[in-house]
Amino acid sequence: MGYRFTLESANTVANLTFGKIMSCYRDIYSSEKSYYEFMHFLERFPENIYSNRQRQYIKSFDYIREIFSNEKNHVRRYPLENLSHYNDDILQALSELSAIFNRCAVKSLLLPEIRTHNEECNDDFMISKNTLRELLYLHEGNSCLILQPQETPQQTTIFDAFPNFEIALKQADLWPAVLFWSNSKDFAFVPVKDENELLYLYKIVKYERKPIEELRRFAEQKKKPSHYIFQLSDLHFGAENVWVAERRLKALVKKQLDCIEFHDSIDFIITGDAVDSPKRETENNYKNFSEYLEGLCSKKPIRVLGNHDINDHGLAIFHGRQQIADIVGDYPKIEILDEPKAILLLFNSNTNGNLAEGEIGTAQMAEMGNLLDKVENLSDYLLIAVMHHHLLPIPQPDCYSKKWYERIWPNSLLSKLLNSLLDKSLELIDANLFMEWLSERNVKFVLHGHKHIPFMTEHKGVNVISCGSSTGQIKHKEKDKTYMSYNILKISEDAVTVTQFAEEIIGAGVKHIKPEIVILRR
């Protein structure tokens, strides 16, 4: 049996497929807009279902539609306020609608390749009606449910309601793929390269006694190694209570690495301010942490300098020690990662400026150009710039504590002026020029820290990724809360996936800040 669904109805389809009747009910009546979107889903249901029992389903569906169309069942409270507003007739109708999806022993979700806004996708076999008809030749009855999107998604989060979808999400760079399951614990994620391979997967479902097990075996044989970049930033060893956050960060890093396949490789990158002030004791603290990371992946972390690494408390007076940083750090330099075909462009963003300002400088841009010109087949490599200072303005999260003057004079002209002066004391002086340089050099990613705020955006073809403080060195508006954050880039043959993580209550568990973003390499 097959069903073609719109991206707007993905959550409804997921809830009905997994028998989440109450969740479906709450979603329908969460707003008036949601209610009418569901009614549109009902209206188009008969033309989107494909089965040799279609007449039987449509007959029972007519009863379901009648229940929802009945005026007395039209709940006019959005959102639902309490349990007394749940209508038994509608719950029963949803149960019968769910039963149509649940008849099949094996269920599957087609996952088309993620496309950018300007990419053509009319030829995508994963969303083609002809593809679905071919699959239904094998499974026109109730042997397998085939859920097919009607269009190519431009982001992955629309499928979040499907249980076990996080398995597919972590491998979004491998889409197109199919997620198969027979129950909540028995599932398989299988990438596909063409229509013939897709058809083969559904033959496995038809003829194998234990299809999910065989599908997993097939997927394992196809796996190719990936490379991970684990970005940490603004550790500030030497600051108050960092030792507590350090222990927690080690546990989070170890748990994250346990999820990575043994044949994959990894690099740790520290985007500045490893220490709070450049002292022997703080550097020794960082060295111990660095050795811990090296023990996990057999490689030393790649570190660029931040303003706190070279200046007491991060503040430079009359350019401070920036000149020393150039001599000691030998910037700029490159790290060539042969396995993922990527090059890290390491910059010192502390070459000029007062207080916490930074600058790349034309000398570094010229020298980096010389280094890149020496690389053979440069166009085959993914270029990733690494620095400390931020390139673009970064909005402050709501959870961050307001400054004293913002609390006294909220939204006042004085507060705005003081914020502007503070932002200026942190900026990268030549940000605009450097952004042009990055764009001209076809640099696809920039990793940085400095503001202690995780953020991600795209500008002039460059994906700018900010890491917050990985030891949670922020002022939270709620006492004892923090914001320990880190980023992970997964580099595969065809794409890069970017995930940002944060833990707000230390020890409570890390969460995704933003959904995973897939950027195609080609």
Image: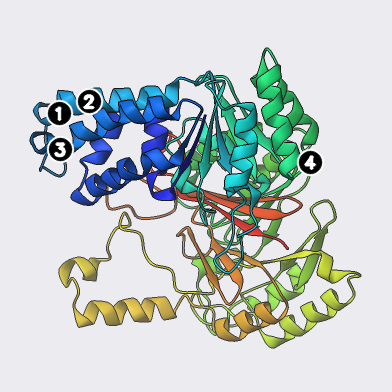
| Residues packed near mark 3 inside 10 Å, few (<14), some (14 to 19) or many (20 plus) | some
Q: Is residue 102 left or right of residue 321?
A: left
Question: Is there any visible trace of residue 62 in the rendered image?
Answer: yes
Looking at the rendered image, the disc whose residue lies closer to the viewer, 2 or 1, is: 2
Does label 3 or label 1 sit earlier along the sequence?
Answer: 3
Looking at the rendered image, the disc whose residue lies closer to the viewer, 2 or 4, is: 2
Please say if the residues under marks 2 and 1 sit with CB atoms less than 8 Å apart. Answer: yes
**Mark 4: amino acid:** Lys
Which mark is on residue 91?
2
Does label 3 or label 2 sit earlier along the sequence?
Answer: 3
* Disc 1 target residue: 86
Hey, which quadrant is residue 93 in on the image?
top left
Q: Residue 279 location, x and y as percent?
A: 60, 58
Is 438 placed above or below 114 here?
A: below
* Disc 3 target residue: 80
Q: Is residue 296 left or right of residue 282?
A: right
Q: Residue 50 location, x and y as percent?
A: 49, 35
* Disc 4 target residue: 224
Is 306 placed above or below 320 here?
A: above
